[in-house]
Image: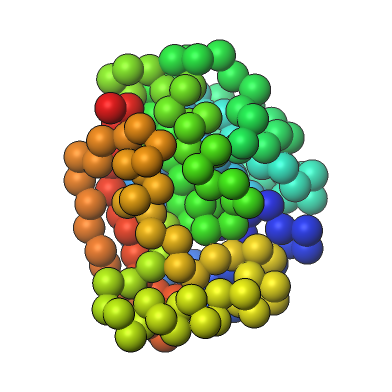
Amino acid sequence: MGFYQRHIVPCLTHLSMSQKQLLPFRQQAVGAAEGRVLEIGIGSGLNLPLYGGMVSSVIGLEPSPELLRMARSRASAAAVPVTLIDASAEAIPLDAESVDTVVTTWTLCTIPDASRALAEMRRVLKPGGALLFVEHGRAPEPGVARWQDRLDPLWSHIAGGCHLNRKMDDLLNQAGFRIDTLAHPRLPGPPTHTFLYQGRARPA
């Protein structure tokens, strides 16, 4: 969440959403992780306390040195070994087929080249591995989607690169993933900002 910003401005903070509102979605995504996990855009490490016994280790990828400094204290207190890496999701510094699970929570909205990043996630996942995600994006209602398109340039400017109108399922399919499960819960707030994509995908 709030990933790749020139100025660190978490996108959902602008919506006045509390971490309490977002926690159940984080718990569902992180709780399904297994084995060696790569978390994209680990930020300040909010997800680290949620990793449990099915996880052997976590690699936290984050291009912001400031956020990585914030994550270190949570990493030291985590129940599993954590390695933090200052790197871009568009060029993940890991071997092919080397992780069991990739986790993204409110991250794909702000990666400049989301398609390239997803291709990298697919590359590092083992053939039977899973991408667990919860993201906000393009709503299905034509009127809402039109407003998302209108607002997106201004919103992206003020919200640190966060995009409102990315259709996450299309991006996943185009990057070579097969979506196993997909739900569309909605958060409280403006409909242009609160339509979610939550689920699991695997390398096709």
**Rendering quarter of residue 172:** top left
The location of residue 129, given as percent across then percent down, is 33, 24
- The image shows residue 18 at horizontal and vertical percentages of 49, 74
- The quarter in which the C terminus is drawn is top left
Q: What colour scheme was applied to this rendering of the protein?
A: rainbow
Residue 73 position in % (x across, y down): 69, 43
> Vertically, is 70 above or below 189?
above
Position above or below: 19 against 109:
below
Which of 156/18 is in front? Answer: 156
Q: How many marks?
A: 0
Direction from residue 136 to residue 141 in the image, left or right: left
Q: In the rendered view, does 133 fall on the left or right side of 62? A: left
> Considering depth in this image, is 73 or 23 the residue closer to the camera?
23
- The foreground one among 169 and 33 is 169
Q: Position of residue 194 (x, y in %)?
A: 39, 74
Q: Residue at x 33, y 85 (%)?
A: 143
At a point 38% along the width and 54% down the height, the residue shown is: 168
Give the residue displayed 69% in from the left and 66% down from the top.
Answer: 160
Residue at image location 27% in from the left, 78% down from the top: 141
Residue 22 makes an appearance in the image: no
Vertical placement of 147 versus 111: above or below?
below
Whether residue 106 is visible, yes or no, is yes
